[in-house]
């Protein structure tokens, strides 16, 4: 018998896997595109078929035993698994069975242990598309394609390994047309940017870059956590070896930085931030800072980002009352995802 973990159970397992395979912050910053040897689909054997699915509770528990410590779920949270269309989808107290009645794209399941398969991060994204709102799924997409910090203070300077890329999410969701949730997943995947380094960077990027019809501000897309090249003279003048911008438009030399209390509050970090600002100025970059208090004052944040946008493309954006409502809903949904699903 084989066990096929899916939905929220698969997501929790992949999140634990990414935390157990961290990368240094500098390696994360230097990566322009994550390749197959980093994301799990390049590491584990894959299949697109369900074979000999475990259905009985005893079989499921025996197969799931070795991975339960990785899931970090409450004792009363059930396992979500897939079964074949011909099998019973009856759920009980400890197991939720989802019947899979349609073909899935290649690489939909990754074998992590003998007889244990897990829905790929891309399949999880589609599955959660049937359960989450647009903004919540957007938050999930940014997390899957980002490198959030590890929770342990002893592991400062390390981040979780990325689980997918926007290109993979979009390609898979387009190929998964018969699956419930695929339509929403396709729409959301087109809005996801790679390399978010924190939930707040995700919320800022989602508000700024999501298309206006979806509630975002529709800014010209920048690059998240981009390493700005520094001249030797700039390094000598500032003592700053590298300058990483939270959101960067290299072509027009604009930077938006998110200044959070937790990440920028200590004296050492403030000094490093000052050197980075000096380095950016010497390289001809114009920098704008968005603080936490500014971000949560929606009208002020919208005005600030609109001014940034106008400096990039010269267009003054006007927002209708309907757009303001959509923007508020989008922000609330992305924030709710982080409240519900972050460890």
Image (spheres, rainbow, N blue to C red):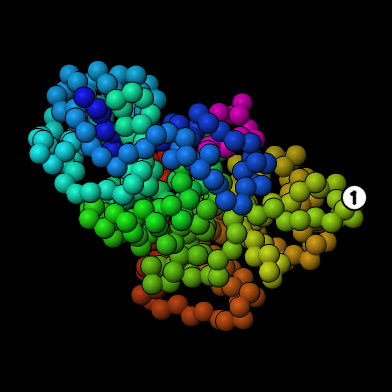
Q: Which quadrant of the figure contains the N terminus? A: top left
Depth check: give the residue in front, 32 or 276. 32
Residue 341 appears anywhere in the view: yes
Q: Position of residue 23 (x, y in %)?
A: 59, 35
279 lies left or right of 75: right
Numbered disc 1: secondary structure = helix
Start and end of the magenta stretch?
152-161
Q: Which quadrant of the figure contains the C terminus? A: top left
Depth check: give the residue in front, 84 or 231. 84
Looking at the picture, does residue 136 appear above or below residue 49? below
Is residue 154 magenta-colored? yes
340 lies left or right of 93: right
Residue bearing mark 1: 236
Residue at 16%, 23% in the rendered image: 57
Q: Position of residue 155 (x, y in %)?
A: 61, 29
Count of number-bearing discs: 1
Looking at the picture, does residue 324 appear above or below residue 227? below
Q: Position of residue 266 (x, y in %)?
A: 70, 39
Quarter where residue 313 is shown: bottom right
Residue at 44%, 69% in the rendered image: 211
Q: Position of residue 128 (x, y in %)?
A: 30, 48
Q: Residues within 10 Å of mark 1 (few under 14, many from 20)?
A: few
Looking at the picture, does residue 53 appear above or below residue 66? below
Residue at 27%, 21% in the rendered image: 63
Is residue 260 magenta-colored? no
330 lies left or right of 130: right
Residue at 53%, 70% in the rendered image: 219
Residue 290 appears anywhere in the view: no
């Amino acid at each position: 018998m084989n066990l096929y973990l899916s939905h929220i159970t698969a997501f929790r397992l992949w999140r634990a896997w990414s935390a157990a395979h961290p990368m240094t912050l500098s390696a994360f910053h230097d990566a322009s595109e994550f390749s197959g040897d980093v994301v799990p689909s390049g590491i584990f054997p894959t299949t697109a078929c369900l074979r000999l699915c475990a259905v009985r509770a005893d079989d499921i528990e025996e197969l799931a035993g070795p991975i339960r410590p990785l899931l970090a779920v409450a004792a009363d949270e059930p396992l979500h698994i897939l079964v074949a269309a011909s099998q019973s989808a009856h759920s009980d107290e400890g197991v939720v069975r989802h019947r899979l009645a349609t073909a899935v794209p290649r690489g939909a399941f990754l074998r992590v242990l003998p007889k244990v398969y897990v829905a790929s991060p891309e399949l999880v994204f589609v599955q959660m598309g049937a359960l989450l709102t647009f903004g919540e799924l957007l938050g999930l997409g940014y997390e899957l394609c980002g490198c959030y910090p590890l929770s342990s203070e002893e592991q400062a300077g390390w981040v979780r390994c990325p689980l997918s890329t926007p290109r993979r999410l979009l390609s898979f969701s387009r190929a998964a047309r018969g699956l419930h949730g695929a339509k929403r997943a396709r729409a959301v995947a087109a809005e996801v940017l790679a390399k978010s380094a924190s939930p707040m960077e995700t919320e800022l990027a989602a508000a700024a870059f999501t298309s206006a019809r979806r509630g975002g501000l529709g800014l010209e897309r920048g690059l998240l956590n981009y390493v700005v090249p520094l001249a030797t003279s700039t390094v000598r003048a500032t003592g700053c070896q590298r300058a990483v911008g939270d959101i960067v438009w290299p072509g027009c030399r604009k930077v938006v930085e998110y200044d959070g209390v937790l990440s920028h509050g200590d004296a050492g970090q403030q000094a490093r931030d000052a050197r980075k600002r000096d380095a950016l100025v010497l390289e001809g970059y114009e920098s704008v800072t968005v603080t936490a208090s500014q971000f949560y004052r929606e009208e002020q944040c919208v005005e600030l980002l609109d001014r940034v946008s106008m400096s990039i493309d010269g267009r003054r954006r006007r927002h209708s009352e309907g757009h303001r409502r959509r923007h508020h809903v989008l922000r609330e949904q992305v924030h709710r995802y982080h409240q519900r699903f972050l460890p």
